Amino acid sequence: MRASYSAVIKTSKGDIEAILYGKEAPKTVKNFITKSESGFYKNLLFHRVEDWVVQGGDPLGNGTGGGLMQTELNARPFTTGSLGIARGADIRVSNDSQFFITKTDATWLDQQYINFGMVTNGMDVVNSMKVGDKILSISVK
C-alpha cells in the first residue's frame, strides 16, 4: 500500500480530483480502489446532499445499501473537501461503499468516521451537486 493515491471521480456535474490516504486508511483505500476498478460505482447516485456534505456510492440509491467493514479511525481532521466513509450507529462498523465529501469543516466527525482522502480539485463540482446526480466512474492511480 502506497502512502497516497490520486483519484478522479467523474460525475454528471464534472470531475472531482482527490488524494487518498493509503498510509492512514489502508484497508479503506484498498477497498475503494477495488470497487472503483471493478466499475462498482458506475451510474450510482449521490443520494444525500446537504449544506455541509454530499454522499453517494449506495447501490440501492437511498442510503441503506452496501456491505460492512471495520472502521479505521485516524487523526486526520474533517475539513472542507474531506472524503469519509458512511456508517451507522456502531462506530466500529462502517459501510463498505458509501462515501461522502464534506462541503465545510466538520469537526464533529473527527475520530468518529473514516477520513480517507481530500479533494484537490473540483470543489465547485461538489458544491453544485444535487440529489440524483450520478457517479459516472472513478479511476485511481
Image: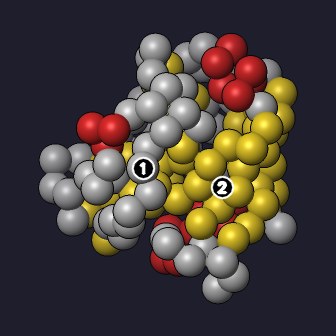
**Disc 1 secondary structure class:** loop
Residue plotted at (62% across, 48% down)? 118
Residue highlighted by disc 2 = 40
Q: Amino acid at mark 1?
A: Pro
Q: Residue 49: x and y, percent?
A: 49, 20
**Disc 2 secondary structure class:** loop
Q: Amino acid at mark 2?
A: Phe
Q: Which quarter of the picture shows residue 92?
A: bottom left
> Where does the C terminus fall, quadrant-wise?
bottom right
Residue plotted at (59% across, 37% down)? 81
**Distance of label 1 from label 2 (alpha carbons):** 28 Å
Q: Residue 39: x and y, percent?
A: 74, 57
Circle number at residue 77 = 1
Answer above or below: position of 37 versus 77. below
Who is closer to the viewer here, 122 or 34?
A: 122
Number of residues whose C-alpha sits closer than 10 Å to that of mark 1, classed few (under 14), some (14–19) or many (20 or more): some
Residue plotted at (78% across, 60% down)? 6
Q: Is residue 119 left or right of residue 54?
A: right
Answer above or below: position of 79 versus 123. below
Q: Is residue 1 visible?
A: yes
Q: Nearer the viewer, mark 1 or mark 2?
A: 1
